[in-house]
Image: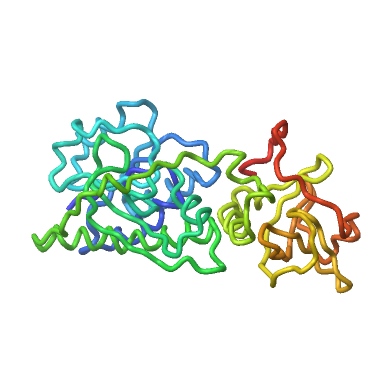
Amino acid sequence: MKIGIVSNSALLYMPLLSNLYHYKNKAGVMLYVGKSTAPDQNTAQALDFCNAAGIPVTFENGKDDLYSWAQVLEPDVVFFVGYSSIVKTERLSHIKHGVYNIHFGRLPQFRGPAPVFWQLRKGYHEIGLVIHRLTDKLDSGPIVWQYNIINLPHFSYDHVYQLFGELQIKGVIDILNGIHTNCALPEIEQDESKAAYYDKPQLKDVLINWNEMEAEEVVDTIKACNSWNTGAITMINGFELKILDATITTAYQHRYRPGTIVINDSGDFTVVCKGDKLLHITFFKISSSNYIPARFAGVYGFKTGQSFESYAPDFKPATIGT
């Protein structure tokens, strides 16, 4: 069986290549690499691996290259993962065992290009990944395989992304085994009444609004922003501060408004949240500074009674995503 992988991201396709290379006595695996400016797109590494393993690799130059690749190399089945261009599925209808998309989010609840971010940002108890039939409508094809995991406190965007990069292998192999044994996995139509689309995160999605967000939501935002955005953003005296790690402490009895800094005698750096819970900050970053342990907050001029700004309508940082 000839297995095609189409992807923009080396972080996603390398685990698949290294595992599928050994599938069923070294099945014929082929890679199509789409155009990308992502920092994880190490094409030299991919090329070295493919050359050593005897895997044909094609790098995209034009919008029709994908269809030429499918016609010339004739894969029996194709898996898309992290490919951002629009695909005309009718031009891939000749592929014998079909075309699938690997989506790092539950469907149809988290359609769109950043499902890991949004599952963490919204604090869902369970987060998941799905493999579905590729159709012309974004993330809408019948679900063939899905896997859910508990959203644990230590999860971050990077951690989940890498974890799903490994878990996707199980789904792909389950589908291939079904094809190999002529016992295909059942397909489940998506419930359109539950469908929701989320775009790539914008500034408002990574900026802490202390007046509106309770402590749990702030922690969820921090998890969703690490480490691609180096934490969740807040503002103080016109300066940007990013919170990289924080925990929630017990309810606070004094009547400070949300966003107020409280530093105790032990040097604990905390912020009052809506609902009077305290957010205990453990690491933060100021502008271009390195990561700062929060116990040194006093050294940087922070003191009890200062307040973070809940929103900054004129703030246009160059730091989102860095």
> Toward the viewer: 135 or 239?
239
Q: Quadrant of residue 184?
A: bottom left
Q: Quadrant of residue 85?
A: top left
Report the coloring of the rendering. Answer: rainbow
Left or right: 284 in relation to 222:
right
Q: Is residue 127 above or below residue 97?
A: below
Tell me residue 152's x, y (percent): 51, 69
Quadrant location of the C terminus in the rendered image: top right
Tell me residue 207's x, y (percent): 65, 45
> Toward the viewer: 275 or 197?
275
Q: Is residue 40 above or below residue 178?
A: above
Left or right: 304 in relation to 43:
right
Tell me residue 239's x, y (percent): 80, 42
> Toward the viewer: 109 or 184?
109
Please report the residue visible at 55 percent of the width from the left and 60 percent of the height from the top: 156
Left or right: 265 in relation to 317:
right
| Tally of numbered tags | 0
> Furthest residue to the left?
182
Left or right: 285 in relation to 131:
right
> Toward the viewer: 283 or 164?
283
Tell me residue 287's x, y (percent): 78, 45
Please report the residue visible at 33 percent of the width from the left and 45 percent of the height from the top: 195
Q: Is residue 66 above or below residue 42?
A: above
Please report the residue visible at 65 percent of the width from the left and 51 percent of the height from the top: 232
